Every structure is written in C-alpha cells, then in structure tokens.
Image (cartoon, rainbow, N blue to C red):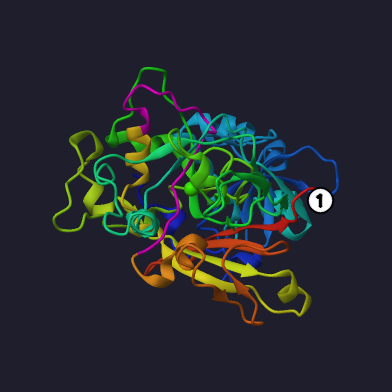
Amino acid sequence: MAALNATHDATRRSWVASANDGQTDFPIQNLPVAVFRRRGSGEALRGGVAIGEQILDLAAAHARGAFSGLAARAASAAAGDTLNALMALGPEAWSALRAALSDALQSGAPQEALLRDALVAQADAEFGLPAHIGDYTDFYTSVHHATNVGRLFRPDNPLLPNYKWVPIGYHGRASSVIVSGQPFHRPIGQSMPAGATAPVVGPSRRLDYELELGIFIGRGNALGERIAMANAESHVFGLCLLNDWSARDIQPWEYQPLGPFLAKNFATTISPWIVTLEALAPYRTAWSRPAGDPEPLPYLDAPTLRSEGAIDIQLEVTLQSARMRESGLAPHRLCRTSYRHAYWTLAQLVTHHTVNGCNLQSGDLLGTGTLSGPTADEMGALLELTAGGKQPVTLPDGEQRTFIEDGDRVALHGHCAAPGFVRLGFGACEATLLPART
Ligand code: CA
C-alpha cells in the first residue's frame, strides 16, 4: 500500500494555474497518465500526465532532460505509444516519476521554463488506449449488484451460494476495449423473446451500461507463480473508469452454460486517464464484511485489509439523449455511489486471479464489475434501476428510458475527496450509441 508523502501535500500548488482551482480533476496531487497526441495531427501517440487543463508531454519532457535517474527511466518508458513498458517497471519507478513530476510542476520549480512548451491543452488532444491490453477479465465485486440482478431472476434466492466465498469473474474480450469518446453501433445478436418458441436475430433492444472501474496490471507474474495478498497491490499500476456495455436480451439466451459472450464483447469503454494507486493513498478506507458473512479464506486475507482495503472513489453515471443535447439540456444523473462498497477488494482480485498460477501481464485490464451501492439511487446499471425494464426512468425533458436509445450519450465520472487532502478525479468515460448497422 503506497505511503503518504510530499506528493499528497494539500498545500502544494502548480505553476499550471488551472491545476489550482480546487474543482479540477487534475490537481498536482493527482498526476494520472494517458496516451495522447494533438487532435487530427497524425503525430505519434505518446504518454502524457494531466495537470489542470493541460497535458505534460512525457516524451518531450524527457527529451528536454527534465528528469534523472529512475524517474528518467520511467519517463523514457512512457514516451512510446503505449504505457506497457512503464507499467512493467514496477512501483519504485512509478513513484520516482510521480515525485519528479510533482517537484517539476510545483509553483516556483526551476523546470517551469524547460517544460512550459511541453504542455498540450487537453481540449486540443485526442487519446489512444493507454496500453496494449493482452487480456481483459471482468469481475462481479458488488454484492448489491449481484443481489439486485439475482432478485430479477430468482426472487427467493437472489445470491448464489458461491458469491461470498469466491470472487466471480470471466475472461472478456480485449480487442473491443475502446477509449472514451469513441461512438459504437448498437449490437445485433440472437435473443429469445418471451413466450416465443424460436430465437430471433436483430438489433439488441435492451442495451445497458455498467458502472465499473478498470484495474491496469503493472508488473505481471510468471506462469505458475501466485501473487500473495501482501504484495498484490504492487502489481497494480492504477485505475480508470470502465463501462462494460451489455445487451440484456442477448445475455440471458446465450450465457448458459459457459457465461457471457456476444452480449458483452462488442464494446467496452474506458477513460483515457489512469490514476495511480499512490495518488489514491489518501482515500483508502476500512473494508468490512457484514455481520454473519463468512470471513475471506486465508489466501484472500491480509493484515491491512480491514483497516485500509477499500478506496472511497465517488462514482456517478449520467445520460444525455440526442433530444436533450439539441435543446441544450445538461446530462441527467442516474446514479451516484462509491467504490468503497465493493465486496471484494482489488488486492483480492489480483490474488484470486493468480491462485491457480494464471499469469497476469503488464497492461492486462481487470474490470471490477458493476459497482452498485446499498441504496436505490446507487444502482450502477439500467437493468437494476428499471427493475429489468419494468419501471422506466424519466429524463428532464419527459423522455423515458428502460434501456439505452440510439443517440444517448452515457458518461461515467469519478472523484475522491477526504479531509485534509485535495479533491482529485478521473476525467470522463463517455460514449454515444449509434444505430445498429443495417
Ligand atoms: Ca460487467
């Protein structure tokens, strides 16, 4: 678990003025990493760090000799078109780069003259996927989501007996992970309408979002080796927002007996910025199990689990229809919750994923699963929010939704706040649904 240090100091300010307004997602205490270039420029994609409304170009900063030692090695590893090489360096290098960036970007730093023209406005940038994602695994770590969804299908026995013992997951599809802002088409697939005797094929009529966090693996593990809870987090580079788009009519017809397939793999949207675990250190919080629930098996337990296993990341989902955009209406919030409600922590996911010797690799992506909280306004998918499509939600202009309509733009946001520390955020994870291809 990353320790608190000078990079978390709430009094530290930046010579990039927009980092200091107290509202930005990207104060000097955050310093998340993405892959970017100037929009439409055809430039090479390279690593960059968010600071206020700007991006510090890591390739340019490194070329100007802004860093030395391990930090220079880390900046050099971030100069390419993916961050895999940086992720593979491990926490000492990530931490050295963070410390050097914090020093160089703080008010009064002598590096200001060197770095001022290594800034690119975020408004002028386009983003690539932050990593070559070799494998993508999606988990199911919210007991509230699992219970809400289970209740739709098994009212008397919503939660399956394995849930409280084993982190549930499945192997997803890495090739269709896309970065925020990229639209995608409504998927076509096979479903079995209620009361029908044969399935139909056509555009999904029950398209949904899932509010999740993405976990990028830093250093991997060799095939056959396990990662223990004690050092699981040292294998995590950082977190992003993740929307696991889901076709709720394709899913129930196809998922038995082997699990999710085409209902899930047509698009998964992630936010471009990866917030490191070190940046999230001030927002750690206690993790606990409800009274009467089983304690985790010893391999999923650790001394620090209960004191600081959870992270309080405030999350929200908004929806803006095409009509709302045309009439200038702001996106409408559908849900607000926190990652701290997760039943299984990210360390438990990494440890469980490797208990059989499965090898994680730098740049692999783990999804947390839909992060619903305990109350009705904390439901992280329309499937839950509309009780399986039976109770529509009403948008500010009177439109109703049970599932997503063509032209709808769904956005996820996340931020952290704690007394004595600066607010920081994750930027946006958004995409607009295009009509199905004919
Ligand atoms: Ca999911």
Left or right: residue 250 compared with residue 188 = left
Q: Residue 158 is drawn in which quadrant?
A: bottom left
Q: In which quadrant will I find the N terminus?
A: top left
Residue at the image position 36 percent from the left and 41 percent from the top:
168
Question: Residue 148, how many percent across, how many down?
Answer: 37, 60
Please report the bounds of the magenta region as a residue range.
353-373
Q: Is residue 358 magenta?
A: yes
Left or right: residue 158 compared with residue 432 = left
Question: Residue 249, how many percent across, how many down?
Answer: 56, 51
Total marks in image: 1
Which SS does the magenta portion mostly show? loop
Q: Nearer the viewer, residue 199 or 343?
A: 199
Q: Residue furthest left?
A: 292
Q: Nearer the viewer, residue 6 or 244?
A: 244
Q: Is residue 331 above or below residue 43?
A: below
Amino acid type at circle 1 is Arg
Q: Which residue is mark 1?
A: 39
Q: Nearer the viewer, residue 116 or 130?
A: 130
Q: Is residue 164 magenta?
A: no
Q: Residue furthest bottom?
A: 397
Left or right: residue 376 compared with residue 302 = right
